[in-house]
């Protein structure tokens, strides 16, 4: 930057640094002087009232002393910065301001530069410390959101640029939701269903890591570059497409792109009769998966399961139920359960109807801490799904969840291992393996499968749970700060998740930060007013001393 443009440069990430237009450093030795410049630079319009500055920077002093101190600081700053470089700081009777058009404030984002105003501490000025913490939290919140506003997983937790563990370095693939361009909203379920079937079909290729459906579906209808989506999901290959209607046919258009090069790897258009059957769709999905398999890795053969075709009305109920299930409203949840039950009444051996109804029950049991009788019902449904389709890992996973919640940890682990053997990309099954290790008092063994679950589904709707489990594992290992960090990441995604709150409170108690724990306890009760320490009794630890320890921490924080 030259003298001619007359601009200053202000760096606030890392240590405070002010430079003149010629690049020469301007020394502001006073901490309060640095803080004053910073507060002005990040304020809207670049100005603050004198009373606001006095309260933040000299709040520990009497008002006359604070007023005099501000006058002296302004006089010193004007002498330092308002010289040959031009006027930067000015004031009138009520306000103090910085000339924003005369200063370039460096981007408040690069983590490598350090935290906001690193090392700037004004002893005894609590109002300034509160402002500083608030600014740092706001900057972190902006940093941790991806292109669609989702909270991004920090690299310290999972590095999405790295290959998915266990797949020999092969790149991941994500299937985006199809665009329904038919003009018929009633066909939205079909467009979503084809996308979901593609994800599940690809996941049967044991060598290929597939990003979870609930992560990739967040990009529905958004005008975002594929390179950005790939970076946010940790996927190199992206599949996208559309469903159109032309007279008596539906036209399915698909394209697979390499997001690193921006080049199309494969594209295809397929006509589907309006009077389609499930058998037709099953065959269509198998063909598409086979082509993608050969395109990505010609050495591998297509693996797809064959199922006897069910009647059209049964399949339509299943697809509609799946569509409702992922809309996450109470009304849609009830409609989904109704669809699956009606499908099972018509076809009691439908593997997909059993799987989807089992998933519905599993989610309900965990959310509402239901009794053992409901867990046995879940196990029976999962076992029926395993019999109906022994090549689908989801049935084994849900059976394992029922066993885990009934404190049959070894049986659960065996079922989870079978689930990931059948479907290596089943992120929730890897997370359940981590949970099982935690509950059997082996937290160190939990970390790898939990992080693999995050890698396979970086924006998955269940990540609040996975991050919460990582928090518990670190807590059990005595790693209090890491436990708090992971609990905070969990709560960013699900504010009312009581288990993450409980873990954070206990970690703070263990650190001896009682006041912080009490503050966290108040936050828990605000987010989850019906919370009771009795919730902790439901957690199926093999050693009940962990339940007692968690409840003890809650009591010390003022709950119970």
Image: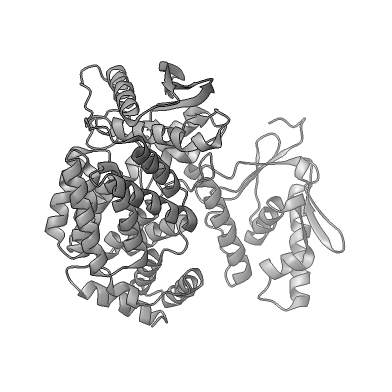
Q: Where is residue 218 in the image (x, y as percent from the top left)?
A: 48, 41
Picture residue at 38% right of the left edge, 36% below the top: 196
Q: In the depicted view, which residue is nearer to us: 270 or 70?
A: 270
Residue 272 seen in this snapshot: yes
Identified at 77% across, 47% down, the residue is: 88
* Direction from residue 193 to residue 49 in the image, left or right: right
Quarter of the figure with the C terminus: bottom left
Give the residue drawn at x 30%, y 62%.
472
Q: In which quarter of the image is residue 302?
A: top left
Position of residue 391 relative to residue 121, above or below, is above
Q: Could you say where residue 159 lies in the image, as x and y percent from the top left?
A: 36, 40
Count of all numbered marks drawn on residues in the image = 0
In this picture, is 161 found above or below 83? above
Q: Is residue 391 left or right of residue 264?
A: left
- Percent position (x, y) of residue 340? 35, 49
Query: Quick one: quadrant of the N terminus?
Result: top right
The percent position of residue 374, horizontal first and vertical second, equals 26, 65
């Amino acid at each position: 930057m030259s003298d001619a443009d007359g601009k200053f440069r202000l760096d606030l990430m890392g240590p405070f640094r002010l430079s003149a237009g010629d690049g020469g450093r301007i020394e502001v030795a006073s901490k309060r002087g640095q803080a004053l410049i910073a507060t002005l630079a990040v304020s809207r319009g670049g100005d603050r009232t004198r009373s606001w500055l006095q309260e933040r920077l000299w709040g520990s002093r009497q008002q006359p002393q604070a007023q005099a101190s501000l006058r002296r600081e302004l006089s010193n700053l004007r002498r330092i910065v308002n010289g040959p470089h031009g006027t930067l700081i000015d004031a009138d009777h009520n306000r103090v301001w910085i000339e924003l058009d005369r200063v370039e404030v460096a981007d408040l984002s690069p983590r490598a530069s350090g935290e906001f105003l690193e090392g700037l501490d004004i002893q005894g000025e609590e109002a300034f410390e509160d402002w500083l913490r608030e600014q740092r939290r706001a900057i972190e919140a902006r940093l941790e959101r991806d292109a669609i506003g989702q909270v991004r997983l920090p690299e310290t937790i999972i590095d999405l640029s790295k290959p998915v563990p266990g797949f020999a370095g092969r790149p991941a693939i994500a299937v985006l939701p199809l665009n329904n361009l038919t003009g018929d909203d009633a066909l939205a379920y079909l467009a979503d269903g084809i996308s979901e079937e593609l994800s599940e079909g690809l996941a049967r290729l044991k060598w290929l890591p597939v990003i979870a459906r609930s992560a990739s579906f967040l990009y529905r209808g958004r005008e975002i570059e594929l390179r950005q989506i790939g970076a946010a999901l940790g996927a190199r290959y992206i599949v996208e497409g559309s469903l159109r209607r032309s007279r008596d046919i539906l036209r399915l258009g698909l394209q697979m792109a390499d997001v690193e090069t921006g080049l199309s790897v494969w594209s295809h258009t397929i006509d589907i009769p309006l009077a389609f059957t499930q058998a037709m769709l099953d065959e269509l999905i198998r063909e598409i998966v086979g082509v993608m398999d050969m395109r990505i890795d010609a050495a591998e053969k297509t693996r797809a399961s064959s199922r006897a075709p069910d009647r059209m009305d049964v399949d339509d109920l299943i697809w509609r139920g799946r569509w409702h299930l992922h809309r996450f409203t109470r009304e849609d949840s009830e409609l989904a359960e109704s669809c699956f039950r009606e499908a099972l009444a018509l076809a009691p051996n439908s593997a997909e109807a059993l799987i989807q109804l089992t998933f519905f029950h599993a989610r309900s049991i965990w959310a509402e801490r239901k009794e053992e009788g409901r867990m046995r019902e879940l196990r029976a449904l999962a076992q029926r799904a395993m019999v109906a389709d022994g090549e689908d890992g989801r049935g084994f996973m849900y059976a394992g969840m029922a066993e885990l919640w009934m404190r049959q940890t070894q049986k659960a682990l065996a079922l989870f291992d079978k689930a990931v053997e059948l479907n290596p990309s089943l992120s929730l099954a890897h997370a359940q393996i981590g949970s099982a290790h935690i509950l059997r008092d082996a937290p160190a063994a939990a970390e790898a499968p939990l992080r693999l679950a995050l890698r396979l589904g970086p924006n998955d709707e269940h990540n609040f749970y996975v991050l919460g489990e990582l928090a518990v594992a670190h807590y059990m290992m005595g790693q209090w700060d890491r436990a708090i960090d992971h609990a905070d990441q969990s709560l960013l995604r699900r504010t009312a998740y009581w288990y993450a709150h409980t873990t954070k409170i206990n970690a703070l108690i263990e650190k001896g930060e009682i006041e912080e724990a009490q503050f966290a306890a108040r936050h828990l009760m605000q987010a989850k007013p019906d919370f009771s320490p009795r919730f902790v009794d439901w957690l199926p630890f093999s050693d009940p001393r962990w339940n007692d320890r968690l409840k003890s921490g809650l009591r010390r924080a003022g709950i119970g």
